[in-house]
Amino acid sequence: MNSIINGIQSLSRFLGRTISWSSIILIFIIVSDVFFRYAFSLTSAATYEIEWHLFGLMFLLGAAWTFDQDKHVRVDLFYQNFSPKMKASINLIGTLIFLIPFCWVTLITSIDFVQSSFLHNETSPDPGGLPARYLIKLAIPVGFGLLILQGIVVIINSIKTLFK
C-alpha cells in the first residue's frame, strides 16, 4: 500500500514541480507580448494561445500536487483547530463524496471532448493560431485523472489516521 502511495505522490510531485517552472516561461511570454504589442503594435493569436495553454497546463497538471501539499482552497476557519482524526474524517468524506465523483464525471466526459478534437484534427479558429488543439484538451482528462489518484492517496492516509 505504501508503495502505491509513494508512487502516486512521486508522480504528482514531479509533475507539479516541473509544471511550476512554466510560470516563469508564462511571465516571460506575457511581458514580451505586452512589450511588442505596445512598442511595435505586434501581436499574434499563437502568442495569446500559448499564454492560456500554459496557464491551463499549470492549473490542470498542478492540481494534484497542490492537493498533495494540502494547499488547495478550503475554509480553514474551523478545520485548523480540529484534531488529526477529525481532519482525517473530513478529508475522507469530502474526497469520497465531492472530489472523486466530480473528477470522475469530468474525466469521463472530457474523453469524448478530446477524441472529437483529435478526430477532426482541430486547430485554432483564429488565423495564425496554434495547431493540434486536442493536445491541450488532453490535459483535461490527464489532470483530473491525476487528481483522482491523489484523492486515493488522501483516502488511504485518512483511513490510516482514523485507525491508528
Image: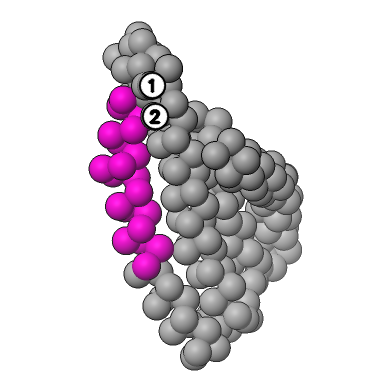
The image quadrant that residue 69 belongs to is top right
For image coordinates 69% across by 68% down, the residue present is: 42
Q: How far apart are marks 2 and 1 (CA)?
A: 6 Å
Task: Assess whether mark 1 and mark 2 are in contact (beta carbons under 8 angstroms).
Answer: yes
Q: Give the magenta range.
A: 89-108
The amino acid beneath tag 1 is Phe
For image coordinates 58% across by 56% down, the residue present is: 57
Question: Which residue is labeled 2 in the image?
Answer: 159
Question: Which residue is labeled 1 in the image?
Answer: 163
For image coordinates 62% across by 81% down, the residue present is: 131
Question: Picture coordinates of residue 65 (x, y %)?
Answer: 57, 40
Circle 2: is it few (<14), some (14-19), or many (20+) Cα within 10 Å?
Answer: some
The amino acid beneath tag 2 is Ile
- Principal secondary structure, stretch drawn in magenta: helix
Circle 1: is it few (<14), some (14-19), or many (20+) Cα within 10 Å?
Answer: few
Q: Is residue 67 visible?
A: yes
For image coordinates 50% across by 43% down, the residue present is: 150
